[in-house]
Image: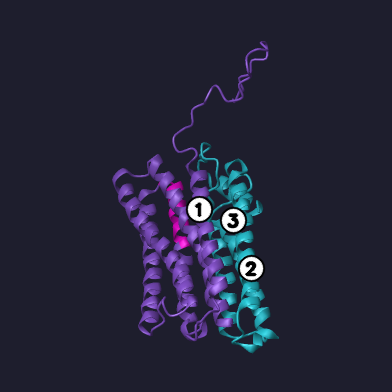
Chain colours: A cyan, B purple
């Protein structure tokens, strides 16, 4: 996580701009934004291509791959655009992020799990395929 | 810096466990963390809306399914608009770091144009859906879809309002400390909306068409 930021930092120092010591968070550099943008374009284009071109035979595999791409792209945005590091705001930003992620996982997985079972166990079967 | 006042000498006096000398905080020193926590709470709103969509996304009530409704080409253009606006906002931040007011204002205008293009395309899509009868009232899937995507669009709308306000502020007062702070908050807000959009185009549009 800190590698691109470290690179941004050295590029910043080489460029000779004065660094504001009062502001204890990273701002990124032109290079950082362009790398993030290039990665995002790639990580966006491939899922669209996979779905629109119906490249893979298996729909499940396609779904799995585009979800993986989305996860990676979210991390890319958080690192390159939001400049999130484990040391930002003395680590409190990271703590808030981790806490939020835990809540999100509980809320999402819990809702889907409970409602899936509710649907399969209590609904009358309009669609017989659900029984398989 | 923080000293706990504790009177250990006298046994009859209860010890005091709080900071006695409250040190000064410079104005705005905690704004970024506070705004980050706001974004995290906003994240929870979207998480709940995604969960609702995940639960109801397959309930078509014999109505249209995502495959019949979504035009992925349009969504790809929309995604490009938001991604480009994120990049141009980055350029605005770089100009701000160089204390270049004109450059910052210019890139903010470019960002707003991309943001408005995104909103225009989204509103066109919504209008088209409503026109062909795929209204929020049609099925649980469409209710969840309009709520989730509409909430994101509303965030972008307010982001543009904020951007316009800040633009006027910066023209008047330049890159003063308060404006820099506001711009950093808006930058986080804007990039955050792009992160949410990754979830929207993956889970709603791409996965919807796959189903």
For label 3, the residue is A79
Q: Tag on residue A96?
A: none
Q: Horizontal and vertical percent for residue B181? A: 43, 44
Task: Name the quarter where the C terminus of chain B is drawn.
Answer: bottom right
State whether the magenta stretch is mostly helix, strand or loop.
helix
Q: Quadrant of residue B117?
A: bottom left
For label 2, the residue is A114
Q: Horizontal and vertical percent for residue B170? A: 33, 48
Does residue B95 appear left or right of residue A132 in this picture?
left
- Which residue is painted at 50% across and 41% down in the image? A18
Whether residue B195 is visible: no
Q: Does the magenta stretch include residue B98?
A: yes
Task: Name the quarter where the N terminus of chain B is drawn.
Answer: top right
Q: In this view, does A71 lie above or below B56?
A: above
Q: In this view, does B209 lie above or below B82?
A: below
Magenta region: B86-99
Q: Are there few (<14), some (14-19), or many (20+) residues within 10 Å of tag 2? A: few
B68 vs B111, nearest the viewer: B68
Residue depth check, mark 3 versus mark 2: number of the one nearer the observer: 2
Q: Is residue B27 magenta?
A: no
For label 1, the residue is B39
Q: Quadrant of residue B92?
A: bottom left
Dot 3 and dot 2 residues touching (CB under 8 Å): no
């Amino acid at each position: 996580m800190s590698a691109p930021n470290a690179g941004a930092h050295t590029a910043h120092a080489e460029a000779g701009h004065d660094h504001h010591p009062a502001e204890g968070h990273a701002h990124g550099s032109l290079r950082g934004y362009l790398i993030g943008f290039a990665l995002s374009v790639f990580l966006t284009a491939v899922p669209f291509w996979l779905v629109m071109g119906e490249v893979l035979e298996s729909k499940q595999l396609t779904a799995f791959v585009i979800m993986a791409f989305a996860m990676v792209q979210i991390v890319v945005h958080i690192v390159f655009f939001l400049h999130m590091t484990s040391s930002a705001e003395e680590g409190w930003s990271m703590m808030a992020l981790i806490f939020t992620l835990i809540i999100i996982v509980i809320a999402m997985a819990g809702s889907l799990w409970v409602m899936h079972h509710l649907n399969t166990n209590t609904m009358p079967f309009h669609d017989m395929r659900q029984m398989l | 810096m923080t000293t706990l006042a504790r009177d250990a000498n006298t046994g009859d006096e209860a010890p005091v466990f709080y900071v006695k000398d409250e040190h000064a905080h410079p104005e705005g020193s905690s704004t970024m963390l506070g705004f980050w926590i706001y974004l995290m709470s906003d994240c929870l709103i979207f998480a709940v809306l995604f969960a609702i969509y995940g639960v109801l996304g397959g309930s078509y009530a014999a109505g249209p399914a995502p495959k019949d409704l979504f035009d992925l080409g349009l969504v790809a253009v929309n995604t490009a608009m938001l991604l480009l606006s994120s990049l141009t906002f980055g350029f605005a931040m770089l100009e701000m770091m160089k204390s270049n007011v004109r450059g910052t204002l210019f890139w903010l205008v470019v960002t707003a144009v991309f943001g408005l293009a995104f909103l225009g395309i989204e509103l066109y899509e919504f209008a088209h859906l409503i026109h062909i009868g795929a209204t929020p009232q049609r099925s649980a899937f469409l209710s969840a879809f309009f709520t989730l995507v509409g909430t994101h669009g509303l965030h972008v709308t307010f982001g543009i309002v904020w951007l316009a306000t800040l633009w006027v502020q910066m023209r008047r007062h330049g890159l003063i400390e308060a404006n820099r702070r506001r711009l950093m908050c808006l930058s986080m807000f804007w990039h955050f909306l792009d992160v949410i959009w990754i979830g929207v185009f993956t889970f709603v549009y791409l996965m919807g068409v796959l189903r």
